[in-house]
Image (tube, rainbow, N blue to C red):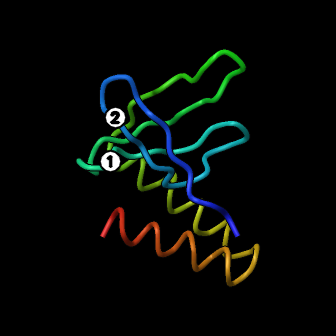
Amino acid sequence: MTKERYLNHPTFGMLYRVALVAEGRDLYATLYAQRIFFVVTLQPRGASFEVVPLMDARHYAEQNVARARREGPDVHAYWRQLFDQTFL
């Protein structure tokens, strides 16, 4: 099962991972004001943060839940719960 992952943004503080976007890119949300979303690309010398609108973030998360459904019930349950907590 996938573990929780957190990052520290220089301005917005703690971010938590909401979904996988692509290889080396993940969707994160602010921990306290859960309506600011970032696509984070981890690089050898740091990370780049790209702000994305709510509907784009939801789309990425829905794609991730669909992909997790094919991986098995435990993985799907984890990502589904995270999706529900974030977007519902």
Residue depicted at 32% across the width and 47% down the height: 54
User: Position of 76 compared to 82: left or right?
Assistant: right
Q: Quadrant of the C terminus?
A: bottom left
Callout 1: 10 Å neighbours few (<14), some, many (20+)?
Answer: some
Q: Can you tell which mark lies on residue 54?
A: 1
> Residue 68, how many percent across, how many down?
67, 69
- Which quadrant of the view contains residue 40? top right
Q: Quadrant of the N terminus?
A: bottom right
Q: Name above or below for residue 29 compared with residue 65.
A: above
Tell how many labels: 2
Q: Which residue is mark 2?
A: 13
Give the CA separation, mark 2 to mark 1: 19 Å
Amino acid beneath label 1: Leu
Q: Name above or below for residue 59 compared with residue 88.
A: above
> Residue 59, how many percent across, how many down?
46, 54
> Residue 27, how many percent across, how many down?
51, 45
